[in-house]
Image (tube, rainbow, N blue to C red):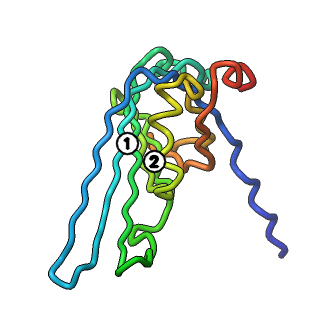
Amino acid sequence: MVRKAKKPPEQLYLVAKIDGVDVAYSASQNVGLEFRDAFDLNIKATIEKIPDKFKRHNGKSMTMSFGSQRSFDGNIVTGDPLKSHLAPIYLRGENRSLYAILPTDALLVLPQLISAGSVSHIAICFDPPHHGTGIIRDVNFISAAQSAEY
């Protein structure tokens, strides 16, 4: 008997308006002169658009944390010890959050883009959550005008 291919899950979109940003940066150097730095960007946002099935989260606050870490040996960047990845999105009860490790270069410019008003929203594409947890497919930092397209 031939098995049918499983239908890919429907992609869902959530759009949230950025309310506030908190930034943390740290640097360290060990005895062998290996230099490391880490950058964290924490965003509070209000959900503006979400599929009807999850409308109870509309207008609610969401926490988004983005981090990066690099190490340098002399003048050479030895890479991101934490590989870039998108962790699951959580939409369960009063817990609305996500976490992602992003490339440092991309993450460093976001606070300036947000404070300048060029980026005011975040659009997240995710698979339908199972027990409140969904796999993130895309994270897009967008303008208010672009948010109307979702």
Q: Which residue is mark 1?
A: 41
Q: Is 31 located above or below residue 57 in the figure?
A: below
Disc 1, SS: strand
Q: Amino acid at mark 2?
A: Leu
Disc 2, SS: helix
Camera-side residue of 69 and 132: 69
Q: Is 74 located above or below residue 13 in the figure?
A: below
Q: Which residue is mark 2?
A: 108
Residue farthest along the front direction in this orientation = 75
Residue 150 is situated, as x and y percent measured from the top left of the image, at 71, 26
Residue drawn 45% across the image and 20% down it: 46
Quarter of the figure with residue 78: bottom left
Camera-side residue of 125 and 117: 117
Label 1 and label 2: CA atoms lie apart by 9 Å
Residue 34 is situated, as x and y percent measured from the top left of the image, at 27, 78
Comes first in the chain, label 1 or label 2: 1
Q: Amino acid at mark 1?
A: Leu
